[in-house]
Image (tube, rainbow, N blue to C red):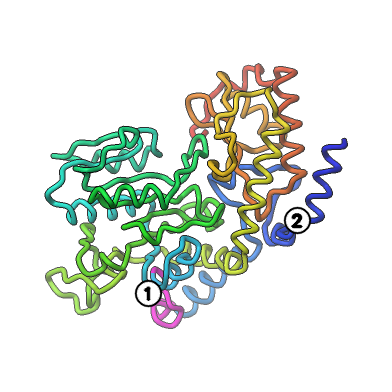
Amino acid sequence: MQDRDRCLALDADDPLRDFRDEFALPEGVIYLVGNSLGALPRRTPERVNQAVTDEWGVQLVGGWNSAGWYDQPLRVGDRIAPLIGAGPGQVVAGNTTSIAVHQAVSAALRLRPDRRVIVSDVNNFPTDHYMIEGLAAGYEIRDFAEGRFDDAAVVLLSEVDYRTAERHDVAEVTARVQAAGALMVWDVCHSVGALRVDVSAADFAVGCTYKYLNGGPGAPAFLYVNPRHHATAVNTLSGWHGHADPFAFESGYRPAEGIRRFAISTPHVLSFAALEAALDIWDRVPLDRLRAKSVALGELFVELVGDALELASPADPERRGSHVSFRHPDGYPVMRALIDRGVQGDFRAPDILRFGLAPLYTRYTDVYDAATTLLEVLEKELWRDDRYARRLAVT
């Protein structure tokens, strides 16, 4: 009880505590999957309803002008920009992370036509690696761990590893890659909204908005393009919204100037409405305090679990993102048993128990209660119940 009292005191003194009230969190659930799908902001249903009933229902096709639908990719991109260290006119929102990865890597390859090597982490998130495989005809794919970039066209890395939360030094890696003449693409899906991100020196960056940013399932992704490439980078997915004059309906493609050339097609208006409601919160979040709480939550979780499980994440919090991972040979049924007892984390093959710590709404007492429940599941071997071994489609 002494530890829980300490957590209650930390919650009372938490400078971010009022943000929790802005999210709709189910009673009886400790939600530690904000690194996969963020919780619902309370104002999102109202904002989406407005987009459906007023903008779509009343304004109809006029909403493209009167409700600003057409400008959503650039307007929302400018709102995301401060969260990744970018400036106005440098980020476009829309589509998915997979599509943004394709855009960034294919553009980088065209900017380095004399180089035939793509570098990435072999343990990178699968969609990143799969997209590289689809672009790699005639190219060698090299593992980042080899540390050789002198003949590389592009290097694609995630700032925070999706399994272990291990964090790369963005500034150091970017400088090393560019000094070798390669272009740097960062995936910040597991860092934006969890820590202070700065991709301003990179050539490209991609990210999603449905994790820590709370944009909702299927929320638009985003793409950062360094201004030095705006005039020369080619968007190989040359859809009509990236055209210099989309409504001239010209027969040939002529790219727009600036970041708009990386728009592709009709924005997903209702998803943008949900994302903008979430960004109303992020406009007010102090990022330094966000990171401080993330570190404190992670340290508390690691301390409470102790040696009951092998820590898969770096022990040094400065080398860790905002989720904490542990290893267990029967990790899947362990997680199922935990979820059945009101603690929602997730499992990543082959043996990772993953717990996302979203500082805006995760409390210190949540971490205490989750760790206590986890220890009980392990000590009493509650996970051995046969029903927990059955794999669901989404883990």
Mark 1 or 2, nearer chain start: 2
Residue, far bottom: 66
- Answer left or right for 19 relative to 181: right
Look at the numbered disc 1 and give the secondary structure of its residue: loop
- Residue 109 lies, in percent from the top left, at 20, 51
- Mark 1 is on which residue type? Tyr
Label 1: how many Cα within 10 Å (few below 14, some 14–19, many 20+): some
Which sits in the foreground, 376 or 199? Answer: 199
Label 2: how many Cα within 10 Å (few below 14, some 14–19, many 20+): some
Q: Residue at x 70, y 21 (%)?
A: 378
Which sits in the foreground, 276 or 328? Answer: 328
Residue located beneath label 1 in the image: 70
Q: Label 1, label 2: how many angstroms apart (C-alpha)?
A: 40 Å
- Mark 2 is on which residue type? Asp
Which of the 4 image quarters holds residue 74?
A: bottom left
Which sits in the foreground, 339 or 51? Answer: 339
- Residue 1 lies, in percent from the top left, at 87, 35
Q: For residue 61, which numbered disc appears in the image?
A: none
Indicate whether 47 appears above or below 299: below
Residue located beneath label 2 in the image: 14
Indicate whether 75 appears above or below 390: below
- Residue 37 lies, in percent from the top left, at 55, 48
Magenta span includes 65: yes
Q: Residue at x 52, y 24 (%)?
A: 351
- Answer left or right for 83 relative to 117: right
Magenta span includes 301: no
**Residues rendered magenta in the picture:** 60-73
- Secondary structure that dominates the magenta span: helix
- In the rendered picture of this protein, how many numbered marks are placed on residues? 2
